[in-house]
Amino acid sequence: MHYHKSHKNKRSLAFFLAGSLLLSGIPVYADEFSDVEFTTDNTDSDITIASDSSADSTAVNDTELTIDSADSGTVSDEDASSTAEISANEATASDDFSTDDSQTAFSDGTAAENSDELDYILGRPMTDEERNAQLNMVPALSDMPVVEDVNSDLDIVPYALYPAKYNSAEESLVTPVKNQSSTNLCWDFSLTSNIETSLLSRGLGYYDLSEEHLAYFWANRVNDPLGNTPNDKLIRTKADYHGTGNGQVASFFLSTWSGMTTEEKVPFSSTTKTWPEDLAYDSAAYMEDAVFSQYDVDRVKLLLSEYKSVSAMMYWNSLDYNPDTAAYYQKTPVLNASNNPQVNHAVTIVGWDDNYNKENFVNGSHLTRNGAWIVKNSYGSSFGDKGYFYMAYDNATYSNLVCNTASTSEKYNNNYFYDGASAGTVVFPGISKGYYASNIFKAIAGNGKDEELGEIVTAVPQDNTDFLIQIYTDLDDPSDPTSGTPAFAAPMEYTQAFAGIQTIQLDTPVKIPQGTLYSVVLRIPNGSQRYYLEKTGNSSSWFSTAAGIDANQSFYSVDGKRWTDAAKAEYCFSIKAHTRTLSTSTVVTPDPDPDETPIVSPAVTPAVSPEITPEIEIPDDTPDTPEPTPTVTPTPTPVSYRINYNKNIRLGVGNMPSASSAQEKQTITVGNAPYCKTRFFAGWNTRADGRGKSYSPGQKIQLNQNITLYAQWDFNYVSSARLIYRVVGKQQITCYGTTNKKITKVSIPATVNYKGINYRVVSVWTNSFKNKSRLTTVSIGNNVSVIGRNAFYNCKKLKKVTIGTGLTQISSGAFRGVKKGCTITIKSLKLKKVSSKIDQSTSKMTVRVPRKKYNAYKKILRKKSRTVKIK
């Protein structure tokens, strides 16, 4: 229901009262971590450590490496006297699941721009007392740490393919709003909500997880169950573990599987307690992946579509909050001493509304568009709209976005790692020609039984990181990760789509004999791509770390043959290995002493007993055999067999078929094709690794036993035209490039059929055809909406480009450096954005556009370029 605006003097009074609460707070800024340089050559030269406050994160040459600190923010701990206390009457027990009537209170977003009506959460303007009660629920806020933003590829998104409104809470995927009370654990509550949502979205049930457990054991770390990190510690600046934090750094801690446990086992307390150490690894939920991202409206929508919630850091100032409409908009960022936006709060984004009226916001007249995020807060269900509020798309401060996936049990439940002291604040800078990174582990979890390695965990600060993965077993040399037997005939290829922490399932599990050394070796071909590290000592204003990094644990190499021990530079790579214990054991026999002559026992011929034929006596008085009773053969009960389906991937999968059954010799139809937003469906197979019998959706078969069919997934598809495609959404793909280095003509179709499934080609990927020096002609299909950054950069012979009817965006440098006089024909009527000068580094370019869009497109194109010809 809509009512007229409240009078300005009432709103001003509320903001004045809020300001009186906040002006006593004094922001505190902290220094960046010092950067570390270390130099190495092939003769194990000395390692040099130096401080440098102006870190350069670009790749360096093969011999000199600079380790960058990713933590650029600072924090002061809580100042309880600076702001208002929590309302004593706030009822957290009434927090209800977000699918009830609380969701209907959100605006339907139909308010027209410049409307005089607001979306009042009470259906009317609040009284002054009600506004004050809302503002009094905001606890004392302290500046929070911000780590360096990751490098997100924001050019490629399924542009304009999202609905106008979405709310994962309406899908019963968001747990009830909680109350952080007087603590500064908003980051903890937000991250915990992510984990709870992941479990719900994966069909694993409702869990009330413990924020207290995460906060306490992050600050009071315990050695891991395998004993590999006895000296890794995290030390808070202040004794109270309920202080500020960061979702990215905390995600690294959760990747060690120290938590999360349930609220029942470790209930929340706003005062300091001491919890038993044996609870440290008592986990009800295991974090698997953590996605880190920069802020962008379309990127957040993409993340919400896939992960259902996004943790985000922001700056809260009650002067920017309208209690009447539960709407927040910060017009101008608050900058810290390093001239970076300051944050003091973390929230959980669960949905969006493109039509949310900008007039609902304080200073909404400064916004150029409607639209807001639907945000779950941690101030209790009495705050805002039953615990939620709206935040403008164009809010001044968003940083350190995090999404998470989790499970309630792990098939590969032995977690090998060395980065127990919260990696994620330091990065390996890369080496210009590419590099190798490796960790060596000793198989000890089986307690005498063999293990099977099925997963590894990687951690990188940029999107689209390519890996070549190899596992080596039975290492001979503990200082050489490649001194054993390679598990794969060729390295496994994998691309980590998003920055962050990724659990990667190996194509084929690897058996590891008990007590032996094995290694995980990563080849990163793109030398500009960085990797997360842990270092022996690290400090900031909010916490410090101490890591016990030993020799023969972590290594890097330029060529994969000559290895440098990272311990010499006091680092280790954030590489983890997940194994499971097998029922068998392999006795590892030590090599014999070459100087010792083996003793050979003389052969002993066993005695052979003579064959004895027993005598059989037949009694004379054998009784007569009775007449047999006729046997009635019962009618056989029909045997029924069942097909079960397994998605066979950790990522979200839609349209999975249900199990079905049929009687013996009856025909049954194989289930439909599911979809994954990052993989091609390649059919069904009786084995998870694809080495069994294959079936296609809709195939008619007869069963003679129960079977489980495992979905098979492909990451790439290379067409007959040698174009590479990758999945970016539900039956949506991007043209990723080509395998033909000498390609002269490119024709990107509107759709591609793979294994009987049609996929829409919606974009041309970043750098996809960069430096294809022989390319002359390009045709782009009608479904392509985005041409990515540098897509045709430096194609010096490209003279003709035809783009179909679906184009909405041309990213920066897309046609930079093409042939002089190149003609680009745009058939689309939907073009909205050209990110840079379209004729950059070329001349006499002509762009032909639809007649009805001539004026509009001329304005868009000429805004960046005055030299391009528009026809």
Image (cartoon, rainbow, N blue to C red):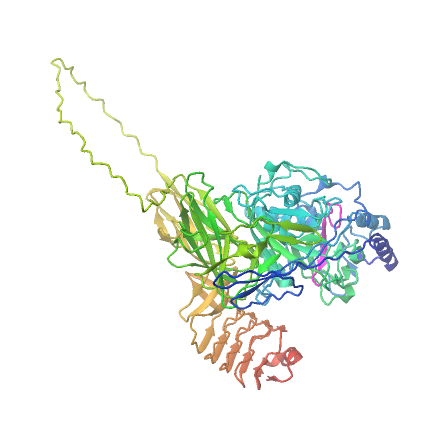
Image quarter where the N terminus lies is bottom right
- In the image, residue 724 lies at what x, y percent? 45, 67
- In the image, residue 322 lies at what x, y percent? 79, 56
Is 639 left or right of 717, judged from the image as shown?
left
**Residue at the extreme front of the image, as rendered:** 595
In this view, the residue in front, 187 or 653, is 187
Residue 458, compared with residue 733, is above or below; it is above
In this view, the residue in front, 144 or 7, is 144
Q: Residue at point 81% right, 52% down? A: 124
Magenta span: predominant SS is loop
Residue 634, compared with residue 620, is above or below; it is below
- State yes or no: residue 15 in magenta: no
Q: Which residues are magenta?
A: 379-394
Residue 233, compared with residue 531, is above or below; it is above
In this view, the residue in front, 343 or 95, is 343
Tell me, yes or no, if residue 647 can be seen here.
no
